[in-house]
Amino acid sequence: MTQPEILVPQSTWTLTNLQAIMERLLPIQSQPDGTLYAELHGANFIVVTKSFHHVRLWILDPQKVDSGVVQSEMSLENPLHLVDPYTQAAILGLAWVPEPTRIYCAGLGAGRVPLVLHHHLPHATIDCTEIDPTVLEMATRFFGFGQDERMRVHVADGRRWLEAAVPYHYIFVDVFLDRGYVPYWLSTVEFYELCRQRLTPGGILVVNLLTEDEYLADRVVTLQQVFGEAEGDVMVCPLHEGNTVLFAVNRTAETPAPDREALIQRTVDLQADQHFAFPLATRSLDLTTDFAGAGIDLTTAQPLYDVTPPPAYFDLLPALENLLTPIDPTLPCPCGSGEPYGMCHGSVQVD
């Protein structure tokens, strides 16, 4: 049964919601700088630190000297300011769909992107999936994230959830494990075909990837194979901070893809209307269809398919558990297969 649209005056909503966010953050505001949380979860440490009014979420592999990338960051003084450039770029999806009413986010992290979309779009409902309940706990406890009738987080595999979902105007895929591992079956032709099937006409798919990902070019041509009927259907926002954000529009005869100039103008209008706490219009200037100019060489890239993963792909899969902190075997496997962990990588005996 279709639920009635929730109509809330935007000015009233934004004031009330910002107050609610700040109240949820009061316990963190009162904490001294330092480590707020550090526990072994599976084979990794989940760590939350506070420094100079900023809170950061880390996932650290104690067996890897190169582990230690900040997963999420938030300003306690201005929680609606997206600190990470890739999160700012993710909001550029609004240039294609300025008023989405159904949004799907695969991968929660600290909940930064869905929190901001939820705040600025009072008529939108947002579904998020996250395979790790501890990540949801960290977002709620330390980053002001909250759920209500318009914002729901489902502990589920992102692809399996989408298979059973109704259409969305805006899909954001941001799924990583430690050291940048992307679950394989959330970056294949078949997965992007599913995303397109679940997008409304003219809807937008936003995908966050790591610039140093050795399969970045393969992921780009995979996306182009599904969405790239014409130039402009797939665009990239290259960032200098380690991320590359891709955009793919569900073009139809009735909903042609806007060109770059139109997209930039829309972000200018959005900035004036929404008063984002970050430079969305400036970020849009990085949008391009020139992948070579963005440093992505597609010459030898090959699409990724469900049944033919590259031979060494799963060598990048981080250690998932140890004997002291095993993973719940009923949760989705972090490898991206969609199977319960106990029936996938969890079926292998831990040494």
Image: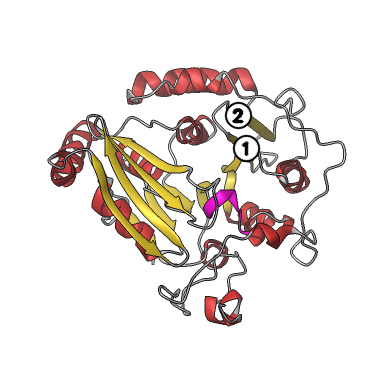
Residue at left offset 49%, top offset 17%: 282
Mark 2 surroundings: few (<14), some (14-19) or many (≥20) residues within 10 A: many
Left of 347 or right of it: where is 189?
A: right
Q: Quadrant of the N terminus?
A: bottom left
As rendered, which of 159 and 8 lies closer to the eye?
159
Q: Which residue is mark 2?
A: 237
Which span of residues is magenta-colored? Answer: 176-183
Q: Is residue 188 magenta?
A: no
**Residue shown at 32% from the left, 48% from the top:** 48
The amino acid marked with disc number 2 is Cys
Residue 3 showing in the rendered view: no
Whole-percent x, y for residue 99 in the image:
43, 37
- Is 182 magenta? The answer is yes
For the C terminus, give its image quadrant. bottom right
Residue 151 appears in the picture as rendered: yes
Q: Eyeballing the image, is 199 above or below 157?
A: above
Between residue 94 and residue 276, name the one nearer to us: 276
Name the residue beneath numbered marker 1: 246
Give percent across and percent down for residue 82: 38, 32
